[in-house]
Image (cartoon, coloured by chain):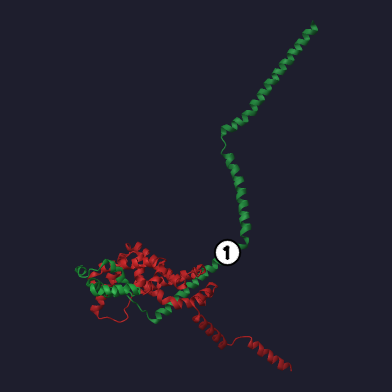
């Protein structure tokens, strides 16, 4: 950390110094920075520090030729697997593609039929036993009214009959 | 006369087939045509199911894909797996490539995404595999090109471990910008295309990455 004290960089130039290190600065900006570097030891030190530090972070690896042979062979095998899997799906899709619309139509009909059949059973199954009793009792009750009306008519006929007999007797 | 006609018929029949040397000539011609084709032409062929065209794309881009993956993984076997995974993803999604960017940009974007996903996965499993990680760091599969003397080798190993740790602490975008610039030497414009961001944003990520590394690796300078 002590090292940071002797490389105090100008904040305004810090980003450009990084780009200068990588050679990614435009001409106009580079000229401006170059003239600043001649008078600023802090920025010059920072640039040197980048030149020392950043290459240390690179870990390069150059595998031998047999590595690349294995690499290509292995990758070809993996691609074969992917292609085979894809072909399998494609074949499956090809089998079903011409029959997709009829299959959907048939499935819709089956679903509707099941809905009506099972739905009816469910609706019937859900009915209240008390309601059933009421349904059975209602016609009986209606019949009772009918019979009571019939009794009344009988009574009326009886009264008429008695009345007519009395008239005859008189 | 009949014999003469029969002989001519046999010759015509023979001519209708390629001799082995003709076949190898045709294959050689096709190979050289593929190797002279541009990436976009090869992609178009591969999109129509030409496997040899895709293999040519692999041959062209495998080294760079491997080196980018190595920059992230810093391990030979992992870099191989990651770069191969990127090729497989490219193969599976080749039909989706619409040519709006170059194949180069599209493919290396896949490589970077695969590497970042791997880092995310590795972070999630790091706690469970701590011992294995330390072991693999002690004996990395990476071999330097030139053998170093023992003390230098130890020092290089220590530096490498410190750099690994410092790179791990960087946020994904900073790490990506840094690896693509510092390790691969790509132009800011290319990095911006790969990261699908503005050049100014890449510069900011790069600057922040360098500042963070400078702080964490101060003792190395």
Q: Residue at x 56, y 66 (%)?
A: A90
Seen from this angle, which residue lies furthest left? Answer: A2
Percent position of residue B89, x then y: 46, 69
- Tell me the quarter of the picture where residue B84 sits: bottom left
x and y percent of residue B131 in the render?
30, 66
**Does residue A134 appear in the picture of this structure?**
yes
What x and y, as percent, mark residue B133?
Answer: 31, 67
Residue found 31% across the figure and 70% down from its top: A16
Q: Quadrant of the C terminus of chain B?
A: bottom left
* Residue closest to the eye, B146 or B199: B199
Q: Would residue A56 be seen by someone viewing this image from the given angle?
A: no
Which residue does the numbered mark 1 point to in the structure image? A93
Q: Is residue A149 above or below residue B189?
A: above
Q: Residue A39's spot in the image, x, y percent?
A: 23, 73
Q: Residue at x 61, y 45 (%)?
A: A116
| Nearer-the-camera pick, B97 or B190 | B190
**Left or right of A27: which side holds A142?**
right
In percent of the image, x 59 and y 45: which residue is there? A118
Instruction: Tell whether A137 sits left or right of B73.
Output: right
Q: Compare residues B17 and B52 and report the one nearer the observer.
A: B52
Q: How many marks?
A: 1
SS assignment at label 1: helix
Q: Chain drawn red, letter?
A: B
* Residue at the limit of the structure toward the right, as seen here: A168
Task: Classify residue B20 by image quadrant.
Answer: bottom right
Residue B92 horizontal side relative to residue B128, left or right: right
Dot 1, crowdedness within 10 Å: few (<14), some or many (≥20)? few
Quadrant in which residue B66 is drawn: bottom left
- To which chain does the residue with label 1 belong? A
Hue of chain A?
Answer: green
Front residue of B119 and B137: B119
Q: Quadrant of the N terminus of chain B?
A: bottom right
């Amino acid at each position: 950390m002590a090292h940071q004290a002797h490389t105090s960089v100008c904040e305004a130039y810090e980003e450009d110094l990084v780009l200068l290190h990588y050679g990614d600065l435009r001409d106009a900006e580079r000229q401006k920075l170059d003239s600043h570097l001649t008078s600023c030891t802090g920025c010059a030190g920072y640039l040197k520090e980048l030149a020392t530090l950043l290459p240390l972070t690179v870990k390069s690896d150059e595998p031998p030729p047999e590595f690349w042979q294995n690499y290509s062979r292995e990758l070809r095998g993996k691609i074969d697997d992917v292609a085979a899997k894809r072909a399998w799906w494609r074949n499956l899709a090809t089998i079903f593609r011409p029959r997709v619309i009829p299959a959907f139509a048939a499935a819709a009909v089956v679903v509707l039929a099941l809905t009506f059949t099972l739905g009816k059973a469910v609706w019937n199954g859900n009915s209240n036993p008390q309601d059933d009793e009421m349904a059975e009792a209602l016609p009986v009750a209606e019949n009772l009214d009918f019979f009571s009306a019939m009794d009344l008519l009988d009574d009326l006929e009886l009264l008429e009959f008695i009345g007519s007999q009395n008239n005859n007797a008189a | 006369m009949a014999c003469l006609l029969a002989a001519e018929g046999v010759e015509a029949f023979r001519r209708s087939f390629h001799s082995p040397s003709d076949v190898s000539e045709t294959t050689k011609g096709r190979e050289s045509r593929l190797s002279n084709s541009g990436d976009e032409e090869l992609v178009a062929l591969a999109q129509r199911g030409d496997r040899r065209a895709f293999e040519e794309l692999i041959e062209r881009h495998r080294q760079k894909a491997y080196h980018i993956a190595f920059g992230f993984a810093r391990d030979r076997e992992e870099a191989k797996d990651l770069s191969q995974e990127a090729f497989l993803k490219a193969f599976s999604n080749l039909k989706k490539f619409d040519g709006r960017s170059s194949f180069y940009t599209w493919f290396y974007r896949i490589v970077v995404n695969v590497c970042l996903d791997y880092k995310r996965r590795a972070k999630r499993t790091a706690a469970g595999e701590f011992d294995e990680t330390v072991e693999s760091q002690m004996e990395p599969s990476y071999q330097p090109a030139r053998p170093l003397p023992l003390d230098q080798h130890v020092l290089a190993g220590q530096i490498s471990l410190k750099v690994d740790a410092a790179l791990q602490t960087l946020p994904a975008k900073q790490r990506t910008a840094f690896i693509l610039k510092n390790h691969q030497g790509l132009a800011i414009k290319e990095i911006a295309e790969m990261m699908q961001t503005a050049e100014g944003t890449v510069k900011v990520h790069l600057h922040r990455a360098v500042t963070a590394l400078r702080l964490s690796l101060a003792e190395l300078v």
